[in-house]
Image (tube, rainbow, N blue to C red):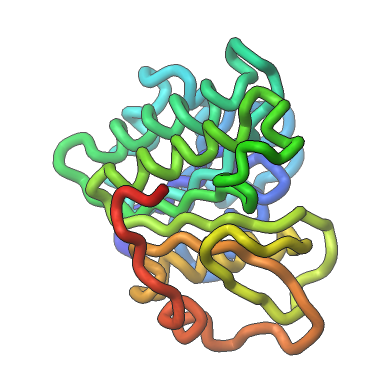
Amino acid sequence: MDNPVVVVGGAGRVGRLVVQRLLERGAAVRVVDHALQQARRHLPSEAGFTLGDVRDPADLAEPLARCSAVVYCVDPGTADSGPDAPQSTVYQGLCNVLDAARAAGQRPHVVLISQHHATHWGHPLNAYGRVLEWRLAGEEALRESGLPYTVIRPGWLTDGAAGLRVRLEQGDRGNGQVSRQDVAEACVQALYCPSASGVTFEMFNETGVAPSQWEELFAALEWDQVPVA
């Protein structure tokens, strides 16, 4: 990629793994995050860092300018309202990033980390700030943005090592766990595999060999029909 990849929320537990994998591929990386201490503690010096908040559009124009791609991995929060509510973080914050990313006619590929059960609003998770409803609203905003995109819905996140078999599903019917390391790898692979554009999928680990051909995994998925319910 000629221009930098912007990792929004890159100081978080998944975000910093995404940053590391991108750097290992030789990509230029910019991180946008409001957690300054986490960034100082965890981010490699090679990654450019901008202290910024997705809830403030003024923080986004400069770091999103002339980027090749965006990975959005912002923690949703659990409040019912206010700055730490999912409406503010994974919906309005994402909309602000999409607006900045489209400025001056840019068309970066956007990879969004959502979560499984995003369409199951009766799930107990939705009691926390209606997080599932706002996750889905963010997904729909991305699908309708006109930008190339990939939506990843991980299962329950673990700190397990990478290297297990990865199962990709569609339809939001499955359940299971997946390591943060494998989610980070999927984010990076989605930027480099053309078949990952325009798809939404759930992601789980299972017993078996780690994937070596991500292009084939993505190619087996069905493209989204926009809008997706």
* Residue 49 in view: no
Give the percent coordinates (x, y) of residue 63.
39, 35
Instruction: Establish if 198 lies above or below 31.
Output: below
Q: Quadrant of residue 176?
A: bottom right
Q: Quadrant where the N terminus lies?
A: bottom left
Q: State the residue lying farthest toward the left.
A: 105
Q: Is residue 210 visible?
A: yes
Q: Residue furthest right?
A: 160
Q: In the rendered image of this protein, does residue 163 appear above or below residue 44?
A: below
Q: x and y percent of residue 23 in the render?
A: 55, 62
Left or right: 152 in relation to 128: left
Residue situated furthest front in the rendering: 122
* Residue located 53% across and 87% down the image: 213
Residue 100 appears left or right of 47? left
| Residue nearest the viewer, comparing 205 with 54 | 205
Residue sticking out furthest to the top: 82
Q: Residue at x 30, y 61 (%)?
A: 2
Q: Is residue 197 above or below residue 41?
A: below
In the image, 115 versus 84, the foreground residue is 115
> Which quarter of the picture shows residue 120?
top right
All told, the count of numbered labels is 0
* Foreground pick, 55 / 176: 176
| Residue closer to the observer: 44 or 213 | 213
In the figure, residue 98 lies in which quadrant? top left
Q: Position of residue 135 (x, y in %)?
A: 54, 38
Q: What residue is rendered at 48% in x and 26% in y?
A: 54
Judged left or right of residue 36, residue 146 is left
Name the residue: 44% across, 25% down. 92
